Amino acid sequence: MGENIDPIFDSILQKATYTKGGIKFLNVGSSAVEYNDDFKLYLVSNLSNPHYSPEVLTKVTLLNFTITYEGLKDQMLSIVAKEEEPKDEEEKIRLMHDTADSLNKKKQLEDNILQLLANSKGNVLENVKLIQSLTESKATSEDIEVRLKNAKVTEDRINNNRKNYEPVAVSASHFYLLIV
């Protein structure tokens, strides 16, 4: 597995289940599959230090069994920052979730507009539903852009604060690699 996950796994990773006749189902591709709450999916990558997008990281639990200097330093930095500035780390995680949700919402809006345009008959300028949808989509898109810009500013501030703990993370990484 590379740094991207096939979109067919999205419904599985998001556990987008629905109940029909008292039985849980999940859509995989175009097929409805019965879902078991005990189901676990393990995806394996041969990349030494994969960097997945925030959208992917919000859907999965990443276990990195390899130890590289950079990977260890990143993990140590995360641990130290979480100990010293727990609110910043919580905010960083919340921002990742919010950013992923915003980008998904934006994609849904674009898909909806394309679907309305494709199904529109006659003059598109006379299609009231399409015009309303475009107006709402524009307002929502502008709101999303503002939120993404604010998130970027906050993320930059948090990353600058994390740089203060980089020497500790580097030292901890060196100590660990010396012992091992």
Image: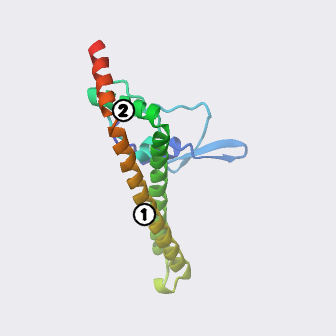
Location of mark 1 (residue): 145
Three-letter amino acid code of the residue under disc 2: Leu
Q: Residue at x 26, y 15 (%)?
A: 178
Locate the N terminus by quadrant: top left
> In this picture, is 75 found above or below 177?
below
Q: How far across and how far down the image is residue 163, in percent?
A: 32, 39
> SS class of the residue under badge 2?
helix
Q: Which of marks 2 and 1 is nearer the N terminus?
A: 2
Of 113 and 92, which appears nearest the observer?
92
Q: Which residue is situated farthest in the top direction here?
A: 179
Horizontal side of residue 162 vs 29, given as left or right: left
Q: Which mark is residue 137?
A: none
Location of mark 2 (residue): 77
> In 3D space, how far apart are the residues under numbered discs 2 and 1 (Cα atoms)?
29 Å
Q: How far across and how far down the image is residue 86, in percent?
A: 49, 37
Of 6 and 73, which appears nearest the observer?
73
